[in-house]
Amino acid sequence: MADAIGADAIGAAGPVAAPTPHRESGWRRVLRTLLPFIVVAGIWEAVSHSGLFHPRLFPTIEAVAAQFVRLTVSGVLPYHAAGTLTRLAAGFALAAAVGIAIGIVMGRWKLAEDTLLPPVSVAAPIPGIAYAPLFLLWFGPGNASTVLLVAFVSSFPVVFNTWTGVKSVREVWLRSAVAMGAGGWRLFLKVVLPGALPFILTGLRLGLAQAWRILVGVEMLAAVPWGLGWMIFGAREFLNTDVMLAGVAVIGAIGLALEKGVFERLERLTVVRWGMMT
Amino acid sequence: MPYIEVYEVSHAYDTPSGRVAGVVGVSFGIEPSEFLCLVGPSGCGKSTLLNIIAGFLSPTSGEVRIGGRVVTGQGLDRGVVFQDFAQLFPWRTALRNVAFGLEMKGVPKNEREEIAMEQLKLVKLEKFAHAYPHHLSGGMQQRVAIARALAYNPGVLLMDEPFAALDALTRDDMQRLLSDVWRKTHKTVVYVTHNVAEAVFLADRVLVMTPHPGRVKTEIAIRLPRPRDPLSIEFLDCQKELLRHLVEPTPIGKDAPRNGGIA
Ligand SMILES: Nc1ncnc2c1ncn2[C@@H]1O[C@H](COP(=O)(O)OP(=O)(O)OP(=O)(O)O)[C@@H](O)[C@H]1O
Ligand SMILES: [Mg+2]
């Protein structure tokens, strides 16, 4: 936006410059971010080398890293990760589509709000994993029940936030838009949806975190024959803690990448750019 | 014949604690291309009246006619500017905010952006066409809002204290700018304010309303030549006269004007 800001034509009303954040030098920032990890890694190494625990139960970081490389090269880890990610994508896409639709309907129609809010409020705080046996019985073990459970559980934050977002669209935007001839679908697409976007994005972000958690959990219940959760759980039988830890590391990394790479970027391109969220 | 006719308009709000009168039996007319100011103490019903003319509220009794047609809802024959800076769409640049009405009308993209740019020039903001509202100051945002209300070329411009939240200096600039815009565009303007100097600076005619529940108390024609000099004796005389009507106790009103109508 900086190029758009120049001298104001009238003078008294100058543009409000966006504050430039104080920039630390690059390597210092990297160090500050890494420091906690280095400390934790140090403690871990000290314990694992101390001989207090059996190395099979408490492997060193080198061993986990070596296992990680081996599993990656052999294609085992990518295979499981791909399976998990595919289920995540399917379940979350379903949750996003259905959740946004329900949230909007609740936000726009009083009747839908009155009907849906009580059951949604009751069902939302129940830990997702509690529904898992039910879904496994209904849809049989396998991808269908896993994806549906992920979608079901992760749709709650999407519904709630979309509903709140639609309700919090400013009256003055609606009035101006209506005064300019907007109505029906166009009012909805061009005003209600972008106006509610900060909330919708927050809902999607929370929904994705939910989806990720429940998915790994369900995979452990052996609902599916492969996937990161399954890999971790399976490794227990052979005391392969290094495999478990490599799996956990991958789960953490993927979650972080989705959060930073997808959502932060999406927000920067939209609501942050528009000044609707900082 | 007046272009806008407000005939015996009353409006009562339904609230949990019963019906509250907004305005009671108000009648007046506005000539084509006239700049009319509505002045009155806070809570007397100015916004209510403007919202009825805009079509956001329907009168409980009476009617409003514009160009002979009874107002039943919003219409592209009226442009509306609110007091709230947040009226602009934050997800659209200044230019695309201004083009919104034309977009709704189905004007092709190139054409509507050209027209929108013209309007931004009129309010001296062409340099900021591609800025998002949150990068503009309050005064600039209000100018974009004026350009936006003018872009689809409505005959009537309705403004509810558009500059009330600005600092005094900016407000002076804005008043001058609005006065110029009005002379260039020949719109019929209904402008709500409780700032006496602002009314004298802008208006052809000022309607003074009584305290709540609002009725029309008097009307004063401002015959000063434009551009007006707020420091001239004549200007100050007009201001004094207006103020006298505003603070004079009325037998109808129960609450005294809280801020004396002066800003
Ligand atoms: N939404 C509403 N619900 C109930 N009563 C309302 C509502 N809006 C306004 N009123 C009542 O109607 C009366 C007129 O309000 P209005 O907003 O038109 O006043 P105003 O002249 O614009 O005041 P101000 O100068 O403070 O903006 C007020 O006394 C208020 O109590
Ligand atoms: Mg008002």
Image (tube, helix red, strand yellow):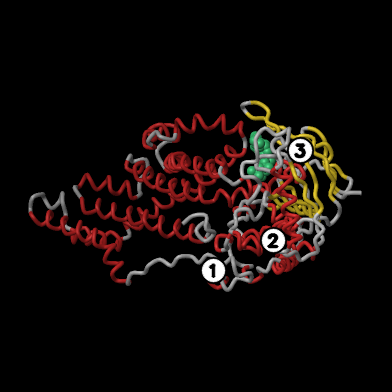
Task: Please state which of residues A98 and B243 is positioned toward the viewer in this rendering.
Answer: B243
User: How dense is the environment of label 3, judged by Cα within 10 Å: few (below 14), some, or many (20 and up)?
Assistant: many
Asked if the residue at label 2 sits under 8 Å from ligand 1, the reply is no
Inspect the image, locate mark 3, and give the three-letter code of the amino acid beneath it. Arg
Judging from the image, mark 1 belongs to the subunit labelled: A
- Mark 2 and mark 3 in contact (Cβ < 8 Å)? no
Task: Please state which of residues A28 and B212 is positioned toward the viewer in this rendering.
Answer: B212
Count of numbered labels shown in the rendering:
3
> Seen from this angle, which residue lies furthest left?
A51
Inspect the image, locate mark 2, and give the three-letter code of the amino acid beneath it. Gln
Question: Residue A232 appears at what percent x and percent y?
Answer: 28, 48
Question: Residue A105 appears at what percent x and percent y?
Answer: 60, 39
Q: CA distance from mark 1 to mark 3?
A: 48 Å
Question: Residue B53 appears at what percent x and percent y?
Answer: 77, 44
**Residue pointed to by mark 2:** B175
The earlier-in-sequence mark between 3 and 2 is: 2
Q: Quadrant of residue B118?
A: bottom right
Judging from the image, mark 3 belongs to the subunit labelled: B
Q: Quadrant of residue B181?
A: bottom right
Q: CA distance from mark 3 to mark 2?
A: 26 Å
Which of pointers 1 and 2 indicates the residue nearer the eye?
2
Report the quarter where the N terminus of chain A lies.
bottom right
Q: Disc number at residue B215?
A: 3
Q: Disc number at residue A1?
A: 1
Q: Residue at left 76%, top 38%? A: B215
Question: Residue A194 appears at what percent x and percent y?
Answer: 58, 52
Q: Residue at left 10%, top 49%? A: A53
